[in-house]
Image (cartoon, grey):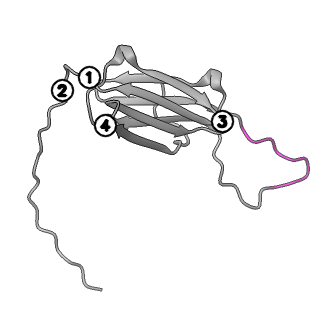
Amino acid sequence: MDWMCGWQPNVDVVIDEGSRTLVVRAELAGADSESLRIYLDDQRLYISGRRAKTARLRGGSFVQKEIADGDFVKSIRLPVAVAQAEITGSYEDGMLTIALPISADEYIPASRTEIRMIVKRVLA
């Protein structure tokens, strides 16, 4: 799969402490539900699909165009280990919701790397 596509949907990622679930909501209005694919690879979740190209009006031209169309891919770094066998998803009213239960027995290492540098202020 080509991970360098034309646009990326807006996504919210929330940890629901009560249900111990990582919830991902992607704004995909107009996306073809048959084209939606969800991949899990290491510590990343990938959402891909397609939104149909906007039909051009006969004799018209765009004055303003903000709605992206065509193929898309969104890559989301997972902050916690998830139970892959229990992932569920739904697509309703243009919103894709993916529920990823947090794994009880797998952990993502919480290592931290400190970078030391000197930051110089540039005077104009």
Tag 4 or tag 3, which sits nearer the N-term? 4
Left or right: 73, with 101 as reference point: right
- Name the residue carrying label 3: 93
Helix, strand or loop for disc 2: loop
Position of residue 121 measured from the top left corner of the image (x, y, whole percent): 20, 78
Left or right: 41, with 55 as reference point: left
Give me the C-alpha separation between circle 1 and circle 2: 8 Å
Give me the C-alpha separation between circle 3 and circle 2: 34 Å
Looking at the rendered image, the disc whose residue lies closer to the viewer, 3 or 4, is 4
> What predominant SS class does the magenta segment belong to?
loop
Give me the C-alpha separation between circle 3 and circle 4: 26 Å
Q: Are marks 1 and 2 in contact (CB under 8 Å)?
A: yes
* Above or below for 11 versus 40: below
Give me the C-alpha separation between circle 3 and circle 1: 29 Å
Disc number for residue 17: 4
Q: Which residues are magenta?
A: 53-61
Helix, strand or loop for disc 3: loop
